[in-house]
C-alpha cells in the first residue's frame, strides 16, 4: 500500500476555544472559531447600558489563563474534594439522590473510558462494524463506498435506545454520524486532491444508523443483530422529503429538483430527540463547511444570506464539489438551503422516507427536544449552535393522537409540518449588576423572565419585510430582525419528563464582551466565557404554548475554585469540575446528565450527573471520562444502561492515520482509533446510581 505523506501539518498547541484540537475544529465545524461571527446584527442586549470594564479579579483570572497548565491543575485539585465527598456519601447514601449514588470519577487524561467502581463497560459498535448483510468486515486499507454504506458510520453523536415491540430482549439503536475526519480515516490522504473513492466513503460515512441489538438479560451486554430488517444507513446521498410550509418554494428548488420537495442527503447531524410517537429527530448543524465558492457570489442579497450562515471562501475543505456540482454554490445556489433542518426518521418503518421539517426553521440545529402536554399539544425546543445565536421553539397546530395504530401513527408523523415557530428573548431581574466577571447579583441567582417572539405560522410571517418562506429558510435573519437574545452557543435543549422544565447547554463563547461584540448579560454572565453554563427554563403555568417564561442558570461551569463558577448554591468543594456542557439527558429519577465537548480545564471530556431538587440541587458528579482527544456525545441514561457515543478519539493536532494518537478502542493490535458506542452497566446488571 502506498502511504503517501501529503498531510497538512498542524501545530501541536492551539489557542482554540476549550480543549478542542485544531484538527477537530477543521473537520467538525469548518474552523468556525477562526471566522467572523455570522451574527452581525445590532440586537439590543442587557449589557448595553452596563459598563463592561473588567474588574481586578477578572484581570487576575485572565492572566492566570495564559499558563497552559493552570486550568488542569485546578481541575485535578478539585477532584480530591469530589472524591472525599463521595467517600463520605458512600457511608450515608441517603444524602445523595437516587440515580447519583456512585463514586465520582476523577478528571484525567487517560486513553480509556474511565467509569466508577462497581460498574462495567462494553463497546457496542464501532465505526466500520457491518450492520447489513453482504458487507465486508472493516479494513481501513481496503474500504469501499459500498462497504461504508453498510457499516456503522463515522463520528457517532446523538443516540437513542428504544424497545423493539414483539421481539423479546431486543432494542433499536439509532445513532447520528456528525462528520468525517479524512486524515484520521485514510492512509495517504491528500487534502488538496482527495480521490473520488475517498469522497464517496465520506458521503457514506455521514448520516444516521439504525441497528437492532440483542440484550443479554444477565450481563446487560448489547450485541448488534447484523442484517435485521430494520437495520439501515442514511447517508449524504439518501433521499429526503422536504415537507412543511417552505417545501416547494423557489428558495428550495435546484436543477435536480425543480419541484423543491426532494433533497439528497443529510450532513453534520449532531444531537436530536425522540418524539412521543416514537420517531427520531436529528439536527443538521455545521452544513456550511461542505459548500464551495460562496466567496465568489456577487449578488449582495445572496451574499449576505450565505454569510449569515457561515458560508464563505472558495474551495471547501473536503473538495466534494470536485465530484458533485451541488456542493458548488455558483452552480447550485439553492443547494445549501436544503440543509440546516430538523430531520425526522421512523426507526420502525424502513419504507417511510425521512423528512426535513421546514416548519421548525433552518439554522445550525444542535438538536431538538420534544414534549407533549396533557392536552396533546406538541412543542419542540431547539438551539442554534453558534456564538451569539438564538434559542427557538415550535408549537404544533394539531394535537397528538394516542395509541400506536396506523391511523394515529400517520397523523402524528405529520404534526411537525404545521404550527408556530418562536425565538427567545431573555430579560434579567438584576439590571446594572452584571459586570462580566461572573459575580452573582445581590439576589443570589442569575434569573429573570423571557418572551417567545412569533416568527411564522403556516404561510403567515410575523417578521416585517420577510415572507413566511424567507423566515423558514433564513430563520437566523428573522431572529435578528425581532431582537432575539444573543446566547453563548445554545446547543442541546431538552425537557425534563418529570417536571416539564427545559434545560439548555450553552457551551462557551470566547468572544463575549470583546471589542464590537455583545457584552455580558444575566443569561450569559461572563465575558470571554470559555467554560459555558446550563440554563433552566419554565414556561408560564407550565403551558407549552405560553409566550412568557421564567428562567435561571443552574450551573456556571468551570473549576469550582474559580469564583466565577456557580452550582446553584451547592458547596463547590463537593462537586466535580465541569467545562463546556454540550448534550443533556435525564435519568428515570429526573436527574440531569450532561456530556461535555472541549473541556477547557485540561482533562478529558466526560459525563456528569446533576441533582435538580432539594438541598442537593447543584450537586455535580462525574460518572465517566472518554479517551484522549475524544468528545462525550449522545448520552442515554436508563434504569440499567448508560450509553455514550465516543466521538473522534485520538483527534489531536499532529495525529493522522499514519500517526495515531490513541489506541482506543481496539488497543495496540488495532489499526486506527474508531469512534464507538459504549454501554455502561452496574455490576450484576443492577439499577444505575442506586
Image (cartoon, rainbow, N blue to C red):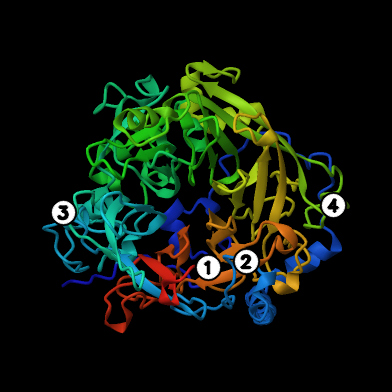
State the residue in front, 573 or 201: 573
Give the mark nearest the N terminus, 2 or 3.
Answer: 3
Which residue, given by chain and number where applicable, does mark 4 sit on?
441
| Rendering coords of residue 274 (x, y %) | 43, 45
- Pointers 2 and 3 in contact (C-beta within 8 Å): no
537 vs 456, left or right, is right
Q: At numbered mark 3, what does the secondary structure look like: helix, strand or loop?
A: helix
Kindly identify the residue that appears in the image at 49 percent across and 37 percent down. 363
Asked if residue 561 can be seen in this view, the reply is: no
Q: At numbered mark 2, what does the secondary structure look like: helix, strand or loop?
A: loop
CA distance separating discs 2 and 3 = 41 Å
Give the mark nearest the N terminus, 4 or 2.
Answer: 4
Which residue, given by chain and number where applicable, does mark 1 sit on?
606
Classify 10 Å Cα crowding around label 2: few (below 14), some (14-19), many (20 and above): many
> Which circle marks residue 578 in the picture?
2
Which residue, given by chain and number where applicable, does mark 3 sit on?
146
Amino acid at each position: 500500500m502506498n502511504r503517501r505523506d501529503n498531510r497538512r501539518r498542524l501545530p501541536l498547541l492551539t489557542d482554540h476555544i476549550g480543549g478542542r484540537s485544531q484538527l477537530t475544529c477543521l473537520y467538525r465545524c469548518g474552523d468556525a472559531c477562526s471566522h467572523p461571527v455570522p451574527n452581525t446584527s445590532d440586537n439590543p442586549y442587557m449589557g448595553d447600558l452596563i459598563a463592561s470594564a473588567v474588574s481586578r479579579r477578572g484581570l487576575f483570572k485572565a492572566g492566570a489563563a495564559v499558563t497552559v497548565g493552570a486550568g488542569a491543575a485546578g481541575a485535578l485539585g478539585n477532584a480530591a474534594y469530589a472524591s472525599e465527598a463521595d467517600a463520605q456519601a458512600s457511608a450515608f447514601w441517603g444524602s445523595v439522590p437516587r440515580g447519583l449514588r456512585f463514586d465520582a470519577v476523577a478528571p484525567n487524561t487517560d486513553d480509556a473510558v474511565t467509569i466508577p467502581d462497581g460498574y462495567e463497560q462494553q463497546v457496542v459498535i464501532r465505526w466500520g462494524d457491518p450492520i447489513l448483510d453482504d458487507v465486508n468486515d472493516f479494513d481501513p486499507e481496503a474500504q469501499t463506498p459500498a462497504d461504508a454504506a453498510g457499516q456503522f458510520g463515522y463520528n457517532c453523536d446523538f443516540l437513542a435506545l428504544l424497545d423493539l415491540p414483539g421481539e423479546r430482549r431486543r432494542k433499536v439503536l439509532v445513532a447520528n454520524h456528525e462528520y468525517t475526519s479524512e486524515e484520521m480515516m485514510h492512509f495517504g490522504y491528500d487534502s488538496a486532491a482527495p480521490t473520488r473513492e475517498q469522497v464517496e466513503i465520506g458521503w457514506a460515512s455521514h448520516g444516521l444508523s439504525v441497528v437492532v441489538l440483542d440484550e443479554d438479560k444477565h450481563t446487560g451486554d448489547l450485541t448488534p443483530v447484523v442484517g435485521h430488517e430494520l437495520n439501515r444507513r442514511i447517508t449524504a446521498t439518501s433521499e429526503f422529503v422536504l415537507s412543511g410550509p417552505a417545501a416547494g418554494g423557489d428558495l428550495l428548488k435546484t436543477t435536480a429538483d425543480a419541484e423543491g420537495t426532494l433533497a439528497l442527503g443529510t450532513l453534520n447531524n449532531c444531537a436530536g430527540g425522540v418524539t412521543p410517537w416514537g420517531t427520531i429527530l436529528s439536527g443538521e448543524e455545521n452544513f456550511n463547511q461542505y459548500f464551495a465558492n460562496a466567496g465568489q457570489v456577487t449578488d449582495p442579497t445572496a451574499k449576505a444570506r450565505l454569510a449569515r450562515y457561515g458560508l464563505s471562501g472558495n474551495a471547501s475543505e473536503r473538495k466534494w464539489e470536485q465530484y458533485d456540482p451541488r456542493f458548488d454554490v455558483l452552480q447550485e445556489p439553492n443547494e445549501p438551503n436544503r440543509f440546516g433542518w430538523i430531520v425526522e426518521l421512523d426507526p420502525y418503518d424502513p419504507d417511510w422516507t425521512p423528512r426535513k421539517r421546514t416548519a421548525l426553521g433552518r439554522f445550525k440545529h444542535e438538536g431538538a427536544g420534544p414534549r407533549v402536554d396533557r392536552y396533546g399539544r406538541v412543542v419542540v425546543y431547539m438551539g442554534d449552535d453558534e456564538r451569539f445565536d438564538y434559542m427557538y421553539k415550535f408549537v404544533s397546530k394539531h394535537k397528538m393522537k394516542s395509541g400506536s395504530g396506523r391511523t394515529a401513527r400517520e397523523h402524528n408523523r405529520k404534526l411537525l409540518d404545521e404550527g408556530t415557530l418562536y425565538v427567545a428573548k431573555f430579560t434579567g431581574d438584576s439590571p446594572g449588576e452584571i459586570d462580566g466577571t461572573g459575580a452573582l447579583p445581590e439576589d443570589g441567582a442569575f434569573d429573570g423572565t423571557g418572551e417567545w417572539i412569533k416568527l411564522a405560522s403556516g404561510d403567515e410571517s410575523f417578521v416585517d419585510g420577510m415572507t413566511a418562506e424567507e423566515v423558514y429558510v433564513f430563520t437566523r435573519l428573522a431572529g435578528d430582525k425581532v431582537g432575539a437574545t444573543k446566547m453563548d452557543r445554545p446547543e442541546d435543549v431538552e425537557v425534563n419528563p418529570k417536571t416539564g422544565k427545559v434545560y439548555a447547554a450553552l457551551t462557551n463563547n470566547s468572544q463575549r464582551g470583546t471589542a464590537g461584540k455583545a457584552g455580558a448579560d444575566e443569561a450569559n454572565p461572563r465575558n470571554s466565557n470559555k467554560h459555558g453554563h446550563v440554563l433552566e427554563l419554565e414556561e408560564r403555568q407550565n403551558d407549552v404554548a405560553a409566550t412568557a417564561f421564567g428562567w435561571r442558570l443552574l450551573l456556571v461551569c468551570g473549576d469550582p475554585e474559580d469564583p466565577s463558577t456557580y452550582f446553584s448554591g451547592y458547596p463547590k468543594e463537593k462537586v466535580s469540575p465541569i467545562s463546556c456542557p454540550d448534550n443533556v439527558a435525564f435519568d428515570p429519577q429526573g436527574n440531569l446528565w450532561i456530556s461535555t465537548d472541549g473541556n477547557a480545564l485540561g482533562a478529558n471530556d466526560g459525563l456528569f450527573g446533576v441533582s435538580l431538587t432539594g438541598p442537593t440541587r447543584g450537586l455535580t458528579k462525574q460518572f465517566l471520562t472518554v479517551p484522549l482527544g475524544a468528545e462525550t456525545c449522545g448520552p442515554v441514561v436508563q434504569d440499567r444502561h448508560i450509553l455514550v457515543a465516543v466521538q473522534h478519539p485520538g483527534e489531536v493536532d499532529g495525529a493522522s492515520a499514519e500517526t495515531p494518537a490513541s489506541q482506543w478502542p481496539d488497543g495496540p493490535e488495532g489499526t486506527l482509533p474508531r469512534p464507538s458506542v459504549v454501554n455502561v452497566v452496574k455490576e450484576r446488571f443492577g439499577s444505575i446510581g442506586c
